[in-house]
Image (spheres, helix red, strand yellow):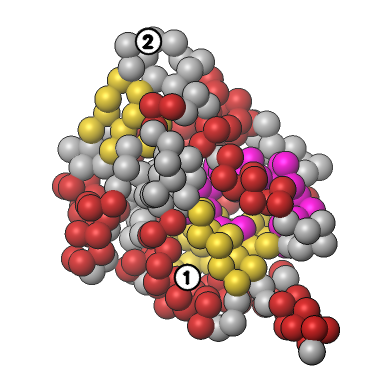
Amino acid sequence: MIRQERVAMENKKHFVLVHGACHGAWCWYKVSALLKSGGDRVTALDMAASGIHPKKVQELASITEYVEPLMELLESLPSEERVILVGHSLGGICISMAMEMFPNKIAAAVFVASFMPSSQDPTFMTRIQQHREKVYSSMDSKIMFDEDAKNASKPNGCMIFGPEHLASNLYQLCPPEDISLAMSLLRPTRLYGDQEMVREQTRVTREKYGSVAKVYIVCEQDQAIKKDVQLSMIEKNPETDVKFIADADHMPMFSKPQELFSCLHHIATTYY
């Protein structure tokens, strides 16, 4: 009986889901339910100062601290366990850092309408960083700067998406109840210094980050990280497997949960 339970556990695929800016583990509730109903294990994480994580955003001194919950989880896994690591939006930077640190614990890394560095072109992420800043400053999103905001090597404030930006650029194809949910649960995201973000995004190497199987899920109606930007990141990672979700906005876990689940299920079957 014990052996049967162990075999059953080993056959389950373990998904680790990482949210984007201002969000938390809560944003995966539809996809988590679908994956669990199929018999898979799911760990949806709150990054530091996100979701119900107890830290305050002002306490974060670096993006490394922001990603600590993910690093701690991967470090705690048995040496033989491998996961399907899924990052959405800013979560792509988080999973990239994890890929560099724990490449042998990741069966595949899935980038969902997210930022994806390239080990072949370190300067590429500087341009992506500029795009990210445009997204964060769009419409009625609120940016709150620290007193020492001129120090580009340190976090220089925080940002939270405004309701107009949320409805028009992130959730434009989502059910209205999910927009209401987001407005009640969003928390500010730290704005990390330009130098730090570029440093973390260019630190990935071919030997580690490049050794992990990568899949990019393109959301074709994304108004935050538009399709051409997503494709440009894929072009810089030519070994990446690519999937498309038509009529998905920046939040496919809300606008197209069944389609996103199907993609993840197929990825797990292929790479696990």
| Residue 96, image quadrant | top right
Q: Position of residue 106 (x, y in %)?
A: 71, 57
Q: Amino acid at mark 1?
A: Ser
Q: Name, please, the residue furthest toward the front.
A: 2
Q: Which residues are magenta?
A: 85-107
Query: Quick check: 224 above or below 272?
Result: above
Residue at image mark 1: 32
Identify the residue at image location x=60%, y=72%: 41
Query: Quick check: 99 above or below 27?
Result: above
Q: Main secondary structure of the magenta part?
A: helix
Earlier along the polypeptide chain: callout 2 or callout 1?
1
| Residue 191, image quadrant | top left
Identify the residue at image location x=82%, y=62%: 80
Q: Nearer the viewer, residue 188 or 59?
A: 59
Query: Quick check: 93 above or below 183?
Result: above
Q: Amino acid at mark 2?
A: Asp
Could you tell whether 206 is left or right of 245 in the image?
right
Residue at image mark 2: 148
Q: Position of residue 15 (x, y in %)?
A: 60, 65
**Circle 2: element type:** loop
